[in-house]
Image (tube, rainbow, N blue to C red):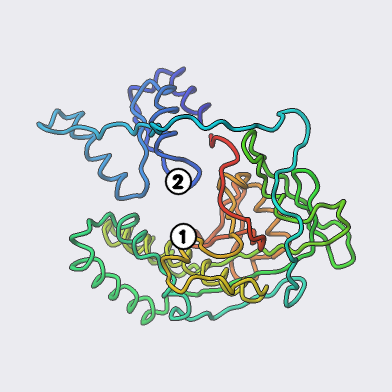
């Protein structure tokens, strides 16, 4: 990312091309502070397509000299005003494992290997839809318009998806024996042979967390279990959004596209809950969806590209293990899942597993 912006600077194109960035691998502060310092033109963050459109309108208005047109203020990092807390840091040199427990019970999976599930009905996972992320994040609605515009529109779209049979929800998932060694998660076959390994980043300070630490170390002589899953709501809904885009029906396109993305996430959450049940660690699951969406349960679902497992190339390893083409999902040369409305994940059962940042994203 930095290299691309620096190249535009070197080619004297910064003033010609404003840059709008977004996506899961970036944060607003990183784009509007760190990258803004590098780029000699305008660079802004958009959390979704709706914010991107608003930024484009503002950029055009400023360029044309429209009265009152202006860009929003750049995001400033929040600095806590509290006194600094003294932290004993672990040494930077050599391998240091975090303090994550290695005595937690290892659950027994219902099977080893992979299974394919097709024909999942919308009613099974629709209740897992994060409506706040849909209405505010994807659709850009304000609180005062959610009830009057958002919910009726959502009901209409869900009815249409069912009536026109636009969803083809499917899952391929599996359980594999594994161990960890330093920063590596080593996935094994049933005889103990190595199938593949993932190398994850480790925090350079604090607890020195690494995703591999949530699995039994190789030297313990015990085997752990790791889950993987790929879910999709199919290609038909993507084909329908493409038709809307080609017809210049941009509002309809953005609404249907945003819903399809959130439905894929709902399916992933629904299936993760099923995995926790199969592993016998769902006893502490919260009763309400809000608690589920805040991950108030044992274990964690880590999607590739996020700070704890940022290397998208690892998707190829998951693809070899799960063969997601069996549910119509393929991996591009850029390590993107197609159809777009698909997600993959590493599923961890450890009670201390949680989302964490292993370093600055760039």
Asked if the residues shown at circle 1 and circle 2 are in contact, with their CB atoms under 8 angstroms apart, the answer is: no
Q: Position of residue 44 (x, y in %)?
A: 35, 34
Q: Position of residue 337 (x, y in %)?
A: 56, 56
Viewer-side residue, 166 vs 99: 99
Residue at x 48% of width, y 47% of height: 24
Residue at x 48% of width, y 81% of height: 121
Q: Residue under label 1, please give it.
A: 294
Secondary structure of the residue carrying numbered label 2: loop
Q: Position of residue 361 (x, y in %)?
A: 54, 37
Q: Earlier in the sequence, mark 1 or mark 2?
A: 2
Q: Residue under label 2, please give it.
A: 23
Q: Is residue 155 above or below residue 232?
A: below
Q: Residues within 10 Å of mark 1 (few under 14, many from 20)?
A: few
Viewer-side residue, 20 vs 276: 276
Left or right for 18, reference 197: left
Residue at x 48% of width, y 62% of height: 341
Q: Residues within 10 Å of mark 2 (few under 14, many from 20)?
A: few
- Residue 264's disc is none
Residue at x 20% of width, y 66% of height: 149
> Quadrant of residue 147 in the image?
bottom left
């Amino acid at each position: 990312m930095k290299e691309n912006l620096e190249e535009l600077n070197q080619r004297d194109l910064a003033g010609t091309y404003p840059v709008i960035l977004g996506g899961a691998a970036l944060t607003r502060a990183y784009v509007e502070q760190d990258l803004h310092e590098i780029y000699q033109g305008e660079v802004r963050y958009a959390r979704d397509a709706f914010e991107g459109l608003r930024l484009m309108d503002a950029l055009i208005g400023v360029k044309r000299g429209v009265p009152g047109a202006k860009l929003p203020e750049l995001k400033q990092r929040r600095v806590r005003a509290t006194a600094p807390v003294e932290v004993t840091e672990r040494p930077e040199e050599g391998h240091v494992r975090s303090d994550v427990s290695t005595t937690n019970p290892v659950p027994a999976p219902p099977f080893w290997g992979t299974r394919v599930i097709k024909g999942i009905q919308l009613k099974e996972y629709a209740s897992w839809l994060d409506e706040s992320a849909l209405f505010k994040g994807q659709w850009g609605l304000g609180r005062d318009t959610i009830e009057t515009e958002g919910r009726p529109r959502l009901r209409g779209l869900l009815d249409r998806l069912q009536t026109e049979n636009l969803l083809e929800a499917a899952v391929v998932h599996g359980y594999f024996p594994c161990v960890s060694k330093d920063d590596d998660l080593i996935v094994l076959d049933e005889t103990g042979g190595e199938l593949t390994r993932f190398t994850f980043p480790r925090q350079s300070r604090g607890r020195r967390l690494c995703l591999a630490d949530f699995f039994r170390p190789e030297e313990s002589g015990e085997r752990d279990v790791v889950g993987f899953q790929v879910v999709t709501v199919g290609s038909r809904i993507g084909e329908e959004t493409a038709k809307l885009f080609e017809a210049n029906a941009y509002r309809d396109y953005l609404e249907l596209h945003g819903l399809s993305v959130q439905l894929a996430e709902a399916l992933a959450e629904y299936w993760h809950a099923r995995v926790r049940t199969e592993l016998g660690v769902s006893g502490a699951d919260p009763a309400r969806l809000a608690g589920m969406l805040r991950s108030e349960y044992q274990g964690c679902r880590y999607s590739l590209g996020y700070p704890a497992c940022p290397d998208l190339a690892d998707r190829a390893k998951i693809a070899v293990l799960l063969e997601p083409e069996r549910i119509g999902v393929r991996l591009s040369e850029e390590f993107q899942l197609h159809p777009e409305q698909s997600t993959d994940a590493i599923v961890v059962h450890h009670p201390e597993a949680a989302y964490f940042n292993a370093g600055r994203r760039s």
